[in-house]
């Protein structure tokens, strides 16, 4: 059977790839250049490139502090997610009265986007007294419904014989989860971790609402604040952007497969 | 025997309840309760200083009759949502190209998808710089190719600001649509195509009769994400234009934020949120109906 | 658990590589953060200029202000100690009115030990 020539498709995909990569290149170029970036015409290749904008950014704004805050909030979100989602996923594999209603409840919660809840969520967080704290920032992200269902599916795939044998051996429920089901669900764990990381690391609206002092700000907030407070004429802002994007990109490239798998088994944010 | 079983059953139920409790608490606190409270707040006059008072539909009256910004925001949000089929079509084209046995398809896929996991604030700043009239890419290309003489202030013009923000959003969300559609494409059984080819069905008919109908669930998913996208684009708008110039790029979500946390009018913001949520529900049901019911899937 | 497979897996290799880089960089910093900035002052012929005043300017948002000054020794060499800066400017002046250019100094981290190329003083005012 004659195959269609592949070079037109390559040509189109090359154009598409170029268009998708131009924004990255433009920003990296600006962060490295030593010229006045507002002079026209802008050069395609950085003029007199130097890495000192990155040094400037590190000391000009409390980048380590923002990084630490982001890391702590994300770590809390990941731990909470692993704990709560595993437990809920396991509970859903059992038969109990009202199971259908609980599943329906979860599914309906999936339909409520976060943006429809910001005002009362702020009031609730304030009432709980965790405003402007790590816990308050991480709290709405401590569990996601997609991940519960991912764990549920993964646990249901574990052969019953293994579980029964463990029960006969007298293992408690939690032990069963940790010793038997989790090791067999490594891909579910990886998916959960990467999805939570991306959502928590990139979260902007909720931290914007909850965080009130500048020491508690996370990276996205720090970036937005830099833009409005210190919108300067050098490449420092873009060095900041690159520094902010590098961790996210690294983790994404490392865990691409799991991330894509997590997205396609549920797609809308839980 | 029976009492042992009952005790075991009770223990098991207690365990299930314990395991479900944390997740359920989070969702109750941050999804269900806020939804209900929003509706309640929208009918009240509430401030942190005095007690809530029931005022009925005053907020809705103000919103629909007096508030021009609301109508601007609503129009902009609808335009935003209306542009998502364009992005979905583009993503479908890319997915089809990538799905065919092209060498290096995995690299192309990664390049297109690279923009999705990025921090949206960073994406906003990147595109803000791309649109800049002095150092930006677009003005540079347009001016050096002679199309225009003077730089165009993209993000400050009333006509171009919203399309520019939408373009930035396209860049980020294209990869996501592509992945969803790619997964859908790969789940179409190959033997259908073989049978059609053997029967002499031309390629375009193969696309319209086999591929598209079987992609309906994926396309429906993309449309729902596109609707939600207009709500999650808060980050982009906040960083690129903050709703400006005037209210040309104001979306419902940015307006809600400004009213609720800028003007501290929580009750009015709650009414706006209710309207936004209703919009989401109506549009999703409409999309469901258009996709043939049942979220687009062909079987029961 | 198969240890070899775990060690070769990207989830371990990538964070480990990052950790090694970060640790290595911090060790380098620990050995080089005395805040010592030293150099020489020469005239246009290349001869060292003793007794010249070298001024260090530190950055204050958009302008530079004087932070410290020192005098070159008999070999025309000067040295600042304990400078907790990562960016600044250096200028040399002699008693008879000669002045060097304003040399921009950019370091990789705060208090990095730096050896600056010689500052050239000549009669032309900077």
Image (spheres, coloured by chain):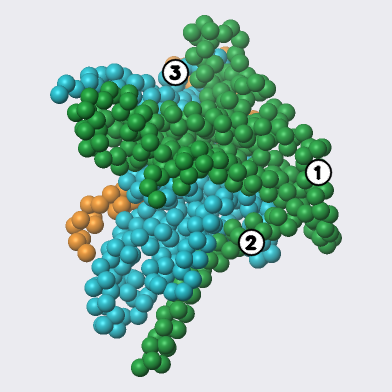
Chain colours: A cyan, B green, C orange
Mark 2 vs mark 1: same chain? yes
Q: Is residue B218 visible?
A: yes
Residue assigned mark 2: B33
Name the one closer to the observer, C42 or B84: B84
Q: In the displayed structure, would residue C123 be above or below residue A141?
A: above
Residue assigned mark 3: A44
Q: Secondary structure at mark 2?
A: helix
Residue for point 46% across, 74% down: A97
Q: Is residue C2 left or right of residue A199?
A: left
Q: Chain of mark 1?
A: B
Q: Which mark is residue B61?
A: 1
Mark positioned earlier in the residue sequence (2 or 1): 2
Q: Chain of mark 2?
A: B
Residue for point 31% across, 52% down: C11
**CA separation in Å, label 2 and label 1:** 25 Å
In percent of width and height, residue A17 lies at 37, 26
In percent of width and height, residue A172 lies at 35, 80
In percent of width and height, residue A182 lies at 32, 65
Q: Nearer the viewer, mark 2 or mark 3?
A: 2
Residue for point 22% across, 64% down: C1
In percent of width and height, residue C115 lies at 43, 34
């Amino acid at each position: 059977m004659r195959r269609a020539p592949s070079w037109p498709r390559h040509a189109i995909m090359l154009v598409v790839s170029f268009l998708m990569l131009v924004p990255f290149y433009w920003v990296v170029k600006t962060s490295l250049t030593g010229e006045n970036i507002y002079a026209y015409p802008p050069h395609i290749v950085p003029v007199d490139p130097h890495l000192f904008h990155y040094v400037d950014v590190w000391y000009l704004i409390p980048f380590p502090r923002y990084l630490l805050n982001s890391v702590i909030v994300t770590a809390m979100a990941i731990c909470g997610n692993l704990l709560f989602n595993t437990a809920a996923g396991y509970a859903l594999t059992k038969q109990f009265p009202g199971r259908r209603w609980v599943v329906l409840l979860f599914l309906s919660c999936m339909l409520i986007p976060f943006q429809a809840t910001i005002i009362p969520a702020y009031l609730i967080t304030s009432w709980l007294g965790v405003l402007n704290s790590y816990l308050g920032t991480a709290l709405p992200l401590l569990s996601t419904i997609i991940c519960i269902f991912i764990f549920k599916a993964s646990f249901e795939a574990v052969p019953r014989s293994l579980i029964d044998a463990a029960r006969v051996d007298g293992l408690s429920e939690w032990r069963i989860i940790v010793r038997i089901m989790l090791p067999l669900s490594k891909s579910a764990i990886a998916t959960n971790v990467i999805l939570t990381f991306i959502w928590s690391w990139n979260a902007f609206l909720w931290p914007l609402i909850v965080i009130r002092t500048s020491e508690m700000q996370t990276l996205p907030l720090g970036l937005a604040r830099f833009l409005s407070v210190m919108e300067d004429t050098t490449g420092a802002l873009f060095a900041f952007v690159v520094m902010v994007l590098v961790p996210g990109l690294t983790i994404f490239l490392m865990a691409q497969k799991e991330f894509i798998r997590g997205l396609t088994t549920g797609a809308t944010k839980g | 025997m029976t009492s042992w079983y009952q005790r075991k059953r009770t223990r098991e139920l207690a365990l299930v309840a314990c395991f479900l409790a944390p997740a359920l608490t989070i969702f109750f606190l941050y999804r269900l309760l806020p939804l209900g409270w929003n509706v309640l707040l929208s009918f009240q006059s509430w401030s942190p200083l005095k007690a809530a008072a029931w005022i009925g539909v005053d907020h809705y009256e103000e919103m629909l009759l007096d508030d021009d910004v609301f109508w601007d925001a609503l129009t902009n949000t609808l335009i935003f949502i209306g542009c998502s089929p364009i992005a979905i079509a583009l993503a479908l084209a890319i997915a089809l190209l990538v799905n065919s046995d092209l060498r290096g398809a995995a690299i192309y896929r990664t390049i297109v998808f690279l923009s999705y996991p990025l921090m949206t604030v960073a994406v906003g700043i990147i595109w803000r710089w791309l649109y800049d009239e002095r150092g930006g890419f677009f003005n540079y290309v347009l001016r050096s190719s002679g199309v225009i003489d003077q730089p165009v202030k993209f993000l400050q013009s009333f006509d171009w600001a919203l399309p520019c923000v939408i373009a930035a959003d396209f860049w980020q969300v294209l990869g996501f649509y592509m992945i969803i559609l790619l997964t859908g494409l790969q789940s179409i059984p190959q033997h259908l195509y073989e049978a059609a080819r053997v029967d002499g069905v031309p390629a375009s008919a193969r696309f319209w009769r086999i591929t598209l109908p079987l992609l309906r669930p994926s396309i429906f998913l993309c449309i729902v994400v596109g609707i939600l996208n207009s709500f999650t684009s808060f980050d982009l708008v906040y960083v690129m234009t903050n709703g400006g110039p005037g209210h040309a790029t104001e979306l419902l979500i940015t307006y809600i934020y400004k009213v609720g946390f800028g003007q501290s009018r929580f009750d009015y913001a709650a009414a706006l949120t209710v309207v936004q949520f209703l919009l989401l529900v109506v549009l999703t049901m409409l999309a469901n109906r258009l996709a043939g019911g049942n979220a687009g899937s062909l079987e029961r | 658990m198969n240890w070899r497979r775990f060690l070769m897996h990207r989830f371990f290799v990538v964070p480990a590589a990052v950790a090694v880089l970060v640790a290595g960089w911090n060790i380098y910093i620990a050995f080089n953060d005395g805040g010592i900035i030293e150099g020489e002052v020469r005239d246009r012929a290349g001869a060292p200029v003793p007794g010249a005043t070298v001024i260090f300017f530190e950055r204050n948002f958009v302008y530079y202000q004087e932070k410290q000054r020192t005098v070159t020794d008999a070999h025309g060499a000067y040295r600042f100690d304990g400078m907790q800066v990562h960016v600044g400017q250096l200028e040399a002046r002699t008693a008879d009115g000669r002045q060097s250019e304003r040399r921009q100094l950019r370091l990789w981290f705060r208090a990095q030990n730096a050896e600056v190329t010689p500052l050239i003083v000549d009669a032309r005012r900077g």
